[in-house]
Image (spheres, grey):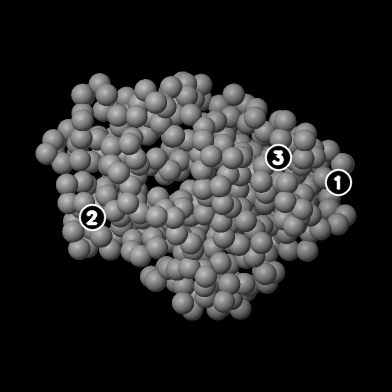
């Protein structure tokens, strides 16, 4: 295959679905750990087509969604200082903190700005030397090379008014927690294709062996997703557990070595709180001591305190696959994209957003047979 439309070919999808149905002798539970995959499954109705043979559950695959309240509150605190300009990606601005979102701060102070790359934030710092420019760095392994490059660029330019508020997270440590939870009931994982494009998938080999779970790297189009599910259930039916790559056009076992080298130079693993999972051992990254000059948490004293999620928001259960979004009493009623209670309804990769956009529309047209 060479072109995108080939990965959306209906006849190919029908063949894959038929093969999955022929293969499965009992229902299997498969977790995808990428929000883009969640949206793909619901957008194309694949969750409906797989119902009865494969139960799809949605993991913490959205980096905006797992960013803890404490980090958002600190970003809000910095933007309220008056001398700092907080920058980040658009989705991050709308996620509620414990009191307000960055979007609300932007409306009242103007000290928050959307950027499309951390290098845009570096350029802002270069052009406005009188202001402290902070980039709120969120994301999985996919986005860490760009923020590491931003630190290098700030160093090369001699900028003293640029820093990172780091809230990067690592996928595999979160998968370890989920796989070890007997209540999760996961039989296999679909690994995030974009993460594996950067980080590779060699590290999943030991994970798959220890937990006796297949791990299948896959992409985001219907053929990608169904091919990944087929590989996963074939292994499960044979009693196998290994790593397979169904995203070969992008992902390699060793990943992107130059990018990984840059990340290793700037960052080191650390324990980090995840929204919905709590503190994940080695689940995040922090700037190494030699790059602490560009660490916002070193440069600015933190005043905000640890806070709890609002009790009515069940995003933690959504992010760990314990419930699906429609099972939350607030879903589509008190929690909508226009007035979200939690991050999964805000982000373009959030599970609640996916269900609101696709499953609700299917139900309204009478075409929704999705199990909840």
Residue 98 in sight from this viewpoint: yes
Residue with the mark numbered 1: 237
Left or right? Give the position of 326 relative to 160: right
Estimate the x, y position of residue 123 in percent, counting from the top left: 21, 35
| Residue 165: assigned label | none
The nearer-to-camera label among 1 and 3 is: 3
Residue at figure coordinates x 27%, y 49% from the top left: 78
Q: Is residue 273 above or below residue 101?
A: above
Q: Which SS class for mark 3? A: strand
The residues bearing labels 2 and 3 have C-alpha atoms spaced at a distance of: 44 Å
Estimate the x, y position of residue 45 in percent, counting from the top left: 62, 62
Q: Which SS class for mark 2? A: loop
The residues bearing labels 1 and 3 have C-alpha atoms spaced at a distance of: 14 Å
| Residue 215: assigned label | 3
Residue with the mark numbered 2: 80
Of pointers 2 and 3, the one earlier in the residue sequence? 2
Residue at figure coordinates x 59%, y 24% from the top left: 254
Q: Which SS class for mark 1? A: helix
Of pointers 1 and 3, the one earlier in the residue sequence? 3
Label count reads 3
Residue at figure coordinates x 66%, y 61% from the top left: 322
Residue at figure coordinates x 41%, y 31% from the top left: 287
Classify the position of the C terminus by image quarter. bottom right
The residues bearing labels 2 and 1 have C-alpha atoms spaced at a distance of: 56 Å
Q: Is residue 32 above or below residue 287?
A: below
């Amino acid at each position: 295959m060479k072109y995108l439309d080939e990965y959306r070919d209906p006849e190919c999808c029908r063949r894959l679905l038929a093969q999955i149905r022929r293969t499965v002798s009992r229902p299997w539970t498969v977790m995808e750990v990428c929000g883009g995959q969640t949206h793909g499954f619901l957008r194309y109705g694949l969750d409906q087509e797989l119902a009865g043979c494969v139960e799809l559950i949605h993991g913490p695959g959205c980096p905006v969604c797992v960013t803890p309240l404490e980090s958002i509150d600190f970003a809000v605190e910095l933007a309220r200082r008056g001398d700092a300009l907080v920058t980040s990606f658009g989705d991050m601005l709308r996620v509620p903190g414990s009191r307000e979102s960055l979007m609300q701060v932007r409306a009242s102070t103007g000290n928050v700005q959307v950027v499309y790359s951390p290098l845009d934030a570096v350029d802002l710092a270069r052009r406005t030397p009188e202001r402290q420019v902070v980039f709120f760095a969120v994301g999985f392994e996919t986005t860490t090379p760009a923020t590491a490059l931003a630190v290098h660029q700030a160093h090369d330019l001699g900028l003293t008014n640029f820093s990172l508020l780091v809230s990067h997270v690592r996928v595999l440590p979160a998968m370890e927690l989920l796989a070890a939870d007997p209540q999760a009931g996961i039989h296999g994982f679909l690994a995030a294709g974009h993460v594996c494009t950067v980080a590779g998938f060699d590290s999943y080999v030991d994970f798959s062996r220890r937990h006796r779970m297949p791990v299948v790297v896959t992409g985001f189009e219907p053929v990608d997703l169904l091919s990944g599910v087929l590989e996963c259930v074939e292994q499960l039916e044979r009693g196998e557990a290994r790593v397979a790559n169904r995203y070969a056009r992008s992902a390699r076992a060793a990943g992107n070595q130059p990018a990984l080298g840059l990340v290793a130079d700037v960052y080191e693993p650390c324990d980090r709180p995840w929204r919905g999972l709590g503190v994940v051992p080695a689940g995040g990254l922090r700037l190494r001591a030699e790059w602490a000059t560009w660490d916002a948490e070193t440069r600015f004293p933190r005043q905000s305190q640890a806070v709890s999620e609002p009790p009515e928001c069940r995003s933690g259960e959504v992010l760990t696959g314990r419930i699906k979004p429609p099972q939350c009493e607030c879903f589509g009623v008190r929690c909508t994209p226009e007035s979200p209670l939690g991050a999964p309804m805000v982000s373009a990769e959030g599970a609640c957003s996916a269900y609101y956009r696709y499953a609700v529309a299917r139900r309204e047209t009478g075409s929704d047979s999705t199990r909840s």
